[in-house]
Amino acid sequence: MTAAEVRTQPAAPASPAWTGAPGVRLAWLHLRSRRVPGAVLALAVCGGVLRAALHWHWTFTSGFLAQQFPMIIGGGAAAVVAMTTHSPFGEPERATGRWLPYLRLGTALAMTGMAIGVLQLAVTGASLNGGIFTLARNVIGITGIGLLASLVTGGLLAWIVPMAYVAFAEYALIEAWRNPWTWPVRPPDDRGAWICAAVVFAAGLAAFTVRGARTRLADSALPVREQVGQQGAGGRRGAPGTGRRDEDPPVQRR
């Protein structure tokens, strides 16, 4: 291949422009930025593990200990939903996205419903102690804990508090605690447990919709605009002890 042939290589064709509705494109980009396709795959894995555990009897089939493994799977699904709150863009997205609260609300609701649907599909035709209602209540309440935790820890670490609550609920199950705020160990028709789980989910959903997940460890840091200004000011300072700035022309010596 000669240099002339290299210069005459045709340019790669540009990708076709988006022809759909702008709102659909915006929603799709939001879902991709939150790694929702990967989260859907993780929910499918949770459902598959639960189905395998019920089919091959990896856990207890009766008694209160039969709730242990489904509780862990429900907590894992809720942790996956909580991790989709992470935003890779941070402050610029908050400053420019007027549709952002609606996208947050829709994504959280859709992912919670999908988690419940996948787990319900996994237990179809199997014997589950407490039924799908207990599993759905656990997912709803623990997801609310994850949404609240994302305001403090950020989306990437939002799984820690829900799984810690699952560990606490496992201890409450062994100790036979019956408080409403330990809703994972309550019967499926317990009204107080449903109220507690629904209140936690509603509080987490409302706070996350308005505020969004924490984007950095120090939310008290300066906004992006001020950080850029400081970086620019720092770039104009010269090396220590030189007595001049970087953009100052060098002094010509005679």
Image (cartoon, rainbow, N blue to C red):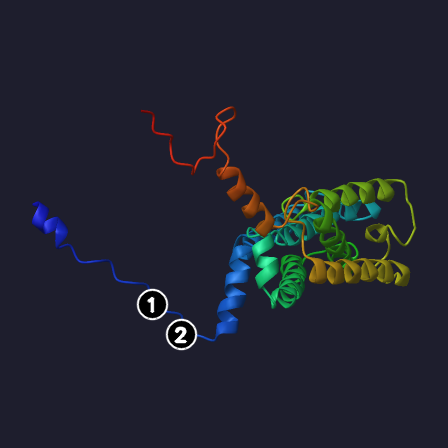
**What residue appears at the point 40 percent right and 74 percent down from the top-left corner?**
19
User: Which residue is the site of mark 1?
Assistant: 16
Position of residue 73 measured from the top left corner of the image (x, y, whole percent): 69, 48
Nearest the viewer among 19 and 233 is 233
Is 17 located above or below residue 205 in the figure?
A: below
Alpha carbon distance from label 1 to label 2: 8 Å
Position of residue 88 measured from the top left corner of the image (x, y, whole percent): 55, 50
SS category of the residue bearing label 1:
loop
Position of residue 228 measured from the top left corner of the image (x, y, whole percent): 54, 47
Residue 132 in sight = no
Amino acid type for the residue under numbered disc 2: Thr
> Which residue lies most toward the front here?
254
SS category of the residue bearing label 2:
loop
Position of residue 248 measured from the top left corner of the image (x, y, whole percent): 42, 37
Nearest the viewer among 203 and 252 is 252
Callout 1–callout 2 Cβ contact below 8 Å: yes
Please tell me how crowded label 2 is: few (under 14), some (14-19), or many (20+) other residues with Cα within 10 Å. Answer: few
Nearest the viewer among 98 and 239 is 239
Is 174 located above or below residue 70 in the figure?
A: above
Amino acid type for the residue under numbered disc 1: Pro
Residue 11 in sight = yes
User: Which residue is the site of mark 2?
Assistant: 19
**What residue appears at the point 51 percent right and 58 percent down from the top-left corner?**
32
Please tell me how crowded label 1 is: few (under 14), some (14-19), or many (20+) other residues with Cα within 10 Å. Answer: few
